[in-house]
Amino acid sequence: MEKSIKSLATNWGLYLGIVLASLTVLGYMNLDLFTKWWFGIGMLILIIVFGIISAMKSRGLSEGFISFKEAFTSYFITIALGLVISTVVSLIIFTFIDPDAAITLKEKILNSTVEMMENFGAPAEAIDETVEKMEAEESMFAIGKVVQSLAFQLIGYSVVGLIVALVVKKNNQEAE
């Protein structure tokens, strides 16, 4: 049964990767999307939902019973595979196909951040300091930065995955 859970999770990870890659391409066609809070929140929710679906479908494969480890494994494989596919697509687009878009995106994010800070009434010194830091940072699509971002995302989504696995798990009392 373990093999079919991993296979199912891999399939859901591929589906998630395709959806996230499509959203990345859509964002590339309209870079302003990457500066919208709802776009990021929507992707966050989408990723978690795919992980939950994978864990629930895996439980269904196991006649309604699944261990915590199996539920978490199903969730994590789905999330990890989807994020890696999306990250690779982003790297290809913004590093190889159109590096100028990465520069434009950085400027748009900087402008959006300044606008948000002004709306919240941040002092001018804080805004200037933030602008300096953002301008001094290396490209968002530098390999080290991308790997670090992917690692932090996996850690964050894993915490959610632990909660999901706790909720989804259902032990077979008769088998114990």
Image (cartoon, rainbow, N blue to C red):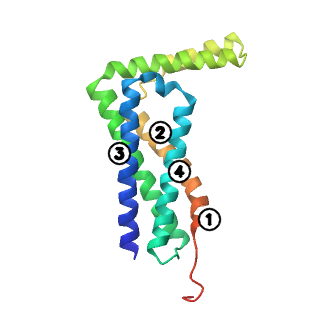
Q: CA distance from mark 3 to mark 2?
A: 19 Å
Q: Amino acid at mark 3?
A: Ile
Contact between marks 2 and 4 (CB within 8 A): the answer is: no
Disc 3 is placed on an element classified as helix
Query: Alpha carbon of mark 3 to alpha carbon of mark 1: how far?
Result: 27 Å
Nearer-the-camera pick, 151 or 98: 98
Q: Position of residue 89 (x, y in %)?
A: 33, 37
Q: Nearer the viewer, mark 2 or mark 4?
A: 4
- Residue hosting label 2: 149
CB of mark 1 within 8 Å of CB of mark 4?
no
Kind of residue at disc 2:
Ser
CB-based contact (under 8 Å), mark 3 and mark 2? no
Residue 111 in the image: state x and y as whole percent: 54, 15
Q: Is residue 95 above or below residue 19?
A: above
At x 45%, y 43%, the residue is 150
Q: Name the amino acid, label 1.
A: Val
Residue displayed at 61% across by 59% down: 163
Label 4 secondary element: helix
Between marks 2 and 4, how big is the CA–CA gap? 17 Å
Q: Residue 167 bears which disc, if any?
A: 1
Q: Name the spot of residue 45 as percent of width and height, x first.
A: 54, 45
What's the amino acid at mark 4?
A: Ile
Q: Which residue is mark 4?
A: 48
| Circle number at residue 18 | 3
Which quarter of the figure has residue 113?
Answer: top right
The picture places residue 53, in percent across and down from the top left corner, at 49, 59
How many angstroms separate mark 1 from mark 4 (CA)? 14 Å
